[in-house]
Amino acid sequence: MVPAPVGHQCPTCVGEARREFAAGPGRRIAIANAKRVSVTNVLVAIIVAVFVIEVFQSGVGGLINGPNAGTLIDLGAENPVLVASGETWRMFTAMFLHIGLIHLAVNAYSLYILGNVLEREVGRVRFLALYLLSGLFASAASYYFSPLNSVSAGASGAIFGIFGAVFAINYRRRHTAQGAMAMRAMAQIIVLNVVINVVLASYLDWRAHVGGAIAGMVMGFAFAAPGRESRQRWISIAGCLGVALVIVATLVVRTDQIRTAMGVVLDTMS
């Protein structure tokens, strides 16, 4: 017998009760708790955790100004030449790195506020797909249009995807008072960010921001397509696949361009 707060318990009986609970009510409780977990909050936690690693690698000086280019590259930042050489995974890892505390704070706050709103609107699976595909599309745009010596990092492209999706969804609902108001508010945020990108073009990767916004709008229009639920599901899948195909095509074309250019340079040097 095992001592308990009240009397004693039989170990065998307790074990059986625990197994029954885990198979029945316990499993349902665990599933319900898992469904309540916000993907947005998990993403915020991940980028904050990655930033802590950045600071650890770069020292206290990296807290405000961020790591230097070499450290960013070591941690997985995007560089066109390295991506073209086969390190395509940098298009993904760059989405979770940030260059300084202000960069992190702005992105984390925007993601937390608008991400939770959009996640409640479209559901966890669609939101996660939109976030990741917008981020990858932003990386692809940066890869295609940025100089070969550029180093880029940040969740801004994925967050601009959220901006674009919120605008697109509420554009579909512009005939309602709430939809019209939300659409105008999102349009103002987008215009403000366009101005910021123009003013700070030498510091911000505006190419990634534009790419993320375009991808987000495409998927937002798909997610808010009218019709029955089954039709909406297939249109949502088609929208995501369309964005994914453009990412792959951009990667293939740009990689060929860079490798050809590098081959010409090497032939000239030899």
Image: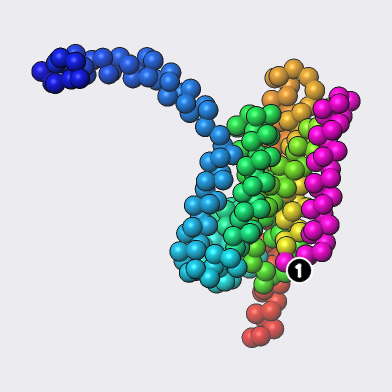
Image quarter of the N terminus: top left
Q: Residue at x 43, y 20 (%)?
A: 29
Q: Residue at x 64, y 44 (%)?
A: 111
Q: Is residue 201 magenta?
A: yes
Q: Residue at x 64, y 47 (%)?
A: 109
Q: Position of residue 205 (x, y in %)?
A: 72, 61
Image quarter of the C terminus: bottom right
Residue 250 or 8: which is nearer the viewer?
A: 8
Indicate the secondary structure of the residue bearing disc 1. Answer: loop
Q: Position of residue 237 (x, y in %)?
A: 68, 32
Count of numbered labels shown in the rendering: 1
Q: Quadrant of residue 225?
A: top right
Q: Position of residue 221 (x, y in %)?
A: 79, 34
Residue 96 or 237: which is nearer the viewer?
A: 96
Can you see residue 118? yes
Q: Which residues are magenta?
A: 174-203
Q: Quadrant of residue 133?
A: top right
Q: Determine the main secondary structure of the stretch shown in magenta.
A: helix
Q: Residue furthest bottom?
A: 270
Q: Is residue 198 magenta?
A: yes
Q: Quadrant of residue 217?
A: top right
| Residue 91 against residue 245 in the figure, above or below | below
Can you see residue 253? no
Q: Residue at x 56, y 37 (%)?
A: 39
Q: Residues within 10 Å of mark 1 (few under 14, many from 20)?
A: few
| Residue 1 against residue 97 in the figure, above or below | above
Q: Which residue is mark 1?
A: 202
Q: Position of residue 150 (x, y in %)?
A: 67, 69
